[in-house]
Amino acid sequence: MTDEGEEQVDEKPEEVTLDEEKINPLKILEEKVLDLEKEKQYNAAEIINMRQRYAREKNILVKFAGMNLAFNILPVVDNLEKALAIENNDSEKIIKGVDMTLERLKNTLQNEGIVRIEALGKEFDPAFMEAIAAIPAPNDEQPGVIIEVIEEGYMFHDRVLRPAKVIVTEQ
């Protein structure tokens, strides 16, 4: 028996069973698989979100792509309206105003990357030109040379915006 002040303490070290000591590899693998499945779902959702964000941004870019050009053309519209508003029909002023307006429009287009295809006197190039007619070459002309431009062609940076419609010499 024990004394009053003394309590009997059964101090047995906690025994760790062999099952707890062994790490269950199957359980670890199952947890790893669950983690990888969650990560896969997260990545799939992130890809879907990125595609939707890209589609929205692309739509916005397409929608507002011409905004800069439109902003630069508005003064040209204003000038043409002013030319038409001249009351006393001073044709010299109208011609001068329209000429100035045309120059401003050409400069605006050039600043946007739109340039005229120089065709007159050049050799025919089907990548940039459309032959409307072919006529026999005059005595001093070589065949395949542009002798008249029916409609001007334009490039937008490095792409043909509209081919030049031309008359070309033939043999």
Image (cartoon, rainbow, N blue to C red):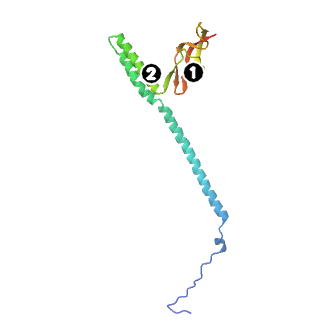
Query: Quick one: SS at disc 1?
Result: loop
The amino acid pointed to by label 2 is Lys
Question: Most extreme residue toward the top, as rendered?
Answer: 139
Residue at position x 34%, y 10% in the image: 90
Residue 43 location, x and y as percent?
Answer: 58, 49
Residue at position x 44%, y 21% in the image: 106
Relative to 68, is 81 above or below?
above
Question: Most extreme residue toward the front, as rendered?
Answer: 140
Asked which quadrant contains residue 47, the reply is: top right
Marker disc for residue 167: none
Asked which quadrant contains residue 49, the reply is: top right
**Quadrant (top left, top right, bottom left, bottom right) of the N terminus:** bottom right
Q: Is residue 82 left or right of residue 164?
A: left
Relative to 149, is 48 above or below?
below
Residue 145 location, x and y as percent?
Answer: 58, 14
Q: Is residue 124 left or right of residue 112?
A: right
Q: Nearer the viewer, residue 140 or 18?
A: 140
Query: Quick one: SS at disc 2?
Result: helix
Residue at position x 44%, y 27% in the image: 70
The amino acid pointed to by label 1 is Phe
Marker disc for residue 128: 1
Dot 2 alpha-carbon crowd within 10 angstroms: few under 14, some 14 to 19, many 20 or more: some
Dot 1 alpha-carbon crowd within 10 angstroms: few under 14, some 14 to 19, many 20 or more: some
Question: Mark 2 or mark 1, which has the lower sequence index?
Answer: 2
In three-dimensional space, the C-alpha distance between marks 2 and 1, rounded to whole angstroms, equals 20 Å
Residue 163 location, x and y as percent?
Answer: 55, 20
